[in-house]
Image (spheres, rainbow, N blue to C red):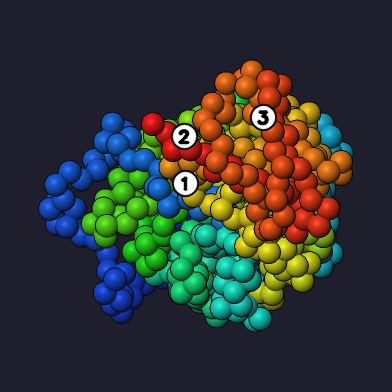
Amino acid sequence: MIMNLKNLLIPVIAATMFASCSTEKSKSDKPMDDDKVSVTTAEVDQLDDPYLEEWPSIARHSCPEWFRDAKFGIFTCLGPASVATQDGTSEWYGWEMYRKSPVWWTNAPNHTRPEGETKEFKYHKEKYGDQKDFGYKDFIKLFKPEQFNAAEWAEVFHGSGAKFAGPVGIFHDNYLMWDSEISRWNSADMAGVDVTAELEKAYRDKGMKFLITYHHAFTWWWYVHSYEYDGAKPGNEDLYCRPHKFSDNNTSFDEYPDEEYEELWYDKLNESIEKFNPDLFWFDMGLELLSDKIRKKAFARILNNAKVKNQDVGICYKIKYDVCIPPSAGILDYEKGRSTTVRKDPWLSDTPLAGWYYNGKPSRTPEAIIEILCDITSKNGCLQLCVSPKPDGTIPEDQKQTLAAIGEWLDMNGEAIYSTRPWLVAEEGPTKLAEDGHFNENWEAIYGETDIRYTRSKDNNTLYVIVLDKPTKGKVVAKKLGTVFEYLTREVKSVELIGTDAKIEWKQNFANMTFSFPENANGKHAFCYKLTLEPEK
């Protein structure tokens, strides 16, 4: 969606007047901890086989084993946007508060919206004043997460069963959630807390892998509406970027980022590498709109840094317009969506527990998230759940309760999820998603007792049969385990229902395999049968 800039009267300021996003904060001379010292060019040159800034070289990388084993992680959306979203605004507040025409973020016409000012535009003007006088640069300073407690977050997320966790490191609004030497627009200088540094320590202390998400590739386009207001004023370029045009052709994102913007995008990414050495890098949309040159530079830097430090990292990417990284080197992400079948390569689904940023929306139920986790796991995927803290830095109680319930389920049934691999067939049952892609998921629980998901142990000697709702008829019928399908051709040594000591009666025939379901079975939500198989000969 692309809005008509001819009607917006956006002044086009000459590029020579402004830097793309100037660096006003001076470099610090303070040394980093020994384990955080930047990997030098000399160290990379000493590698036996460094990654080159070329796709054939980068394509040698593959998804780390720890990611394939993890299955479940959490990221958190906390930042200046939280101040507005608590009042029910869009998390794209910095975009919406300046926007007066009914367009999507691609600038294409949005015919579902009425003409005139957005609710965010009106909200901002009524609460803070005219956007020319009180813009996002002023609003951003209202973010003060004074109740933020990294150790408490780590306790909650570790208790949920998450194996990796991390923050939004930098959102579309160009605000860094760490103490930056590159940009003054960061949480340490403006809000008094280095969120990323505190979370990295707390999560690693709990044995979790560390994630950072990056959304700043799209920043170049995100503030385009601000150029009618304070965004075009000299001195604001380091937040809003150099004023530039935005095509009114809804198949184009022209004007595309200039070299100075791309180098600053890279520098912010590189600063986070040097400070935190993330185990998982997650890139939001916009990455594919940057130049091939800067992407290759960034990915080679990530991989060489990890290689020097003997670290196995993952790189997640979305496809909004085009594949921007060799599939072998990256982990495909579906936003609020998932694959309908087993994918050969591991993949990821990111979805919110409530709102992306805190908006008062109630938490989804444990049943819904557990169903989604089981479905994703059976298809070689991993779930990255978004938790939305309040602007003061506290996690809403209902989200805590859901996370605790997920952790309780995983404490009992985790062996059917963690470190498993897809079986010959992923599923059976009547409830299906329509197609692969973004935004195809159910919000709440939809699966019934005849919906089954299959996973297996890495050694292929254990098969897990996950029934997505509590059986009501005293038995479970697994049709795909009938001899007619020739999927389960090995002898079954034993069958048990995880978490329950009761003896399970079972029988395999031509049409199916049946299992008894005890009346006093422990647990709730999904129920996992464990089939121990005779070793392969």
Numbered disc in front, either 3 or 2: 3
Rate crowding at label 1 as few (under 14), some (14 to 19) or many (20 or more) other CA atoms within 10 Å. many
Quadrant of res 250: top right
Tag count in the figure? 3
Q: Return the x and y of residue 203 as percentages of the image width and height.
A: 50, 70
79 shown above or below 2: below
Which mark, by number, is residue 68?
1
Going by the numbered disc 1, the residue's amino acid type is Arg
Q: Return the x and y of residue 260 as percentages of the image width and height.
A: 38, 49
Residue at image location 53% in from the left, 52% down from the top: 418
Numbered disc in front, either 3 or 1: 3
Label 2 secondary element: loop
Task: Compare marks 3 and 1 and give the one earlier in the sequence.
Answer: 1
Q: Return the x and y of residue 393 as percentages of the image width and height.
A: 66, 74
Q: Return the x and y of residue 66 as percentages of the image width and height.
A: 43, 52
Rate crowding at label 2 as few (under 14), some (14 to 19) or many (20 or more) other CA atoms within 10 Å. some
Residue at image location 87% in from the left, 44% down from the top: 472
Going by the numbered disc 2, the residue's amino acid type is Asp
